[in-house]
Amino acid sequence: MPFTGKILLVDDEAHIRKYVGLVVRGLGAPVIFEASSGEQALALYAQESPDLVLLDVNLPGMTGVQILSGILAQDPDALVVMLTSLANRQTIEECLRLGAASYIRKDTPKEAILAELSAIVSDSPNDPAP
Amino acid sequence: MKPDPDPAPAPDGRLQISEVRYSLAELLREIEVERRESSFAMETLDQVEIQKMFANRRRRDARNKK
């Protein structure tokens, strides 16, 4: 089932947002919004209510973990997937505890990223796909 | 942790077993510090291990919703 919902990509590096954007198009035909900072991400989340958020951890200013908390404070049912090169146990456990839907290392092959995102989106009660 | 003092040898020369009591609260505090500050916290996990952690949580959540 193609995913036609809205996705918010949060990463401070434009080339990563572009790459991840290309990967997530493999889900179907999602509408993609991009943010390069925590403030932008929270504002876009409030404005667009995306169905899925792909969030980097290591950002200048607000960290991904703080942004995760901010999004879940706005919407406890938000589907937030951490997509990051930082993979230490402490950060992962914190994201898990806060309520991230998943945590994907950026060095994961794109087919595996896509498979994990497809599984998360199809498990979600918020899945906008008919 | 304050285990009892060293066991005194029994008259026949063998060591007597003495009771050692640990405080659960203290043990849990030590584990928490260990998880936060040691190399354990900084351990890098591979994607398979990460996915298992999240899948376990999803299973738990699904069970709780039933």
Image (cartoon, rainbow, N blue to C red):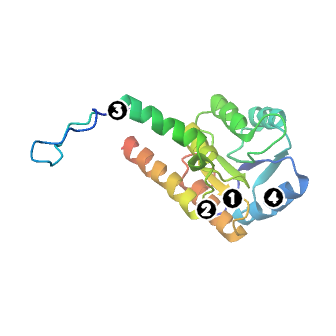
B27 and B21: which one is in front?
B21
Position in image of residue B11 (x %, y %): 10, 42
Badge 1, how many Cα within 10 Å: few under 14, some, many 20+? some
Which tag is nearer the camera, tag 1 or tag 4?
Answer: 1
Badge 2 sits on which subunit?
A: B
- Amino acid type assigned to the residue bearing label 3 in the image: Leu
Q: Give the residue drawn at x 86%, y 46%.
A: A12
Residue in the foreground of this view, choosing between A12 and B8: B8
Q: Are marks 3 and 4 on the same chain?
A: no
Residue A52, can we see it? yes
Instruction: Indicate which disc, 1 or 4, sits on the residue closer to the N terminus.
Output: 4
Q: Amino acid at mark 2?
A: Gln
Q: Which residue is mark 4?
A: A21
Residue at 70% from the left image edge and 63% from the top image edge: A27
Q: In the figure, residue A17 lies in which quadrant?
A: bottom right
Q: CA distance from mark 1 to mark 2?
A: 6 Å
Q: Which residue is mark 1?
A: A105
Q: Secondary structure at mark 4?
A: helix
For residue B24, which numbered disc appears in the image? 3
In this rendering, does residue A127 appear at all?
no
Q: Chain of mark 3?
A: B
Same subunit, labels 1 and 4: the answer reads yes
Q: Tell me the amino acid under the disc marked 4.
A: Gly
> What type is the residue that disc 1 sits on?
Arg
Which label lies toward us, 2 or 4?
2
Q: Residue B47's mark?
A: 2
Where does the image place residue A108, in percent across and percent down from the top left? 69, 65
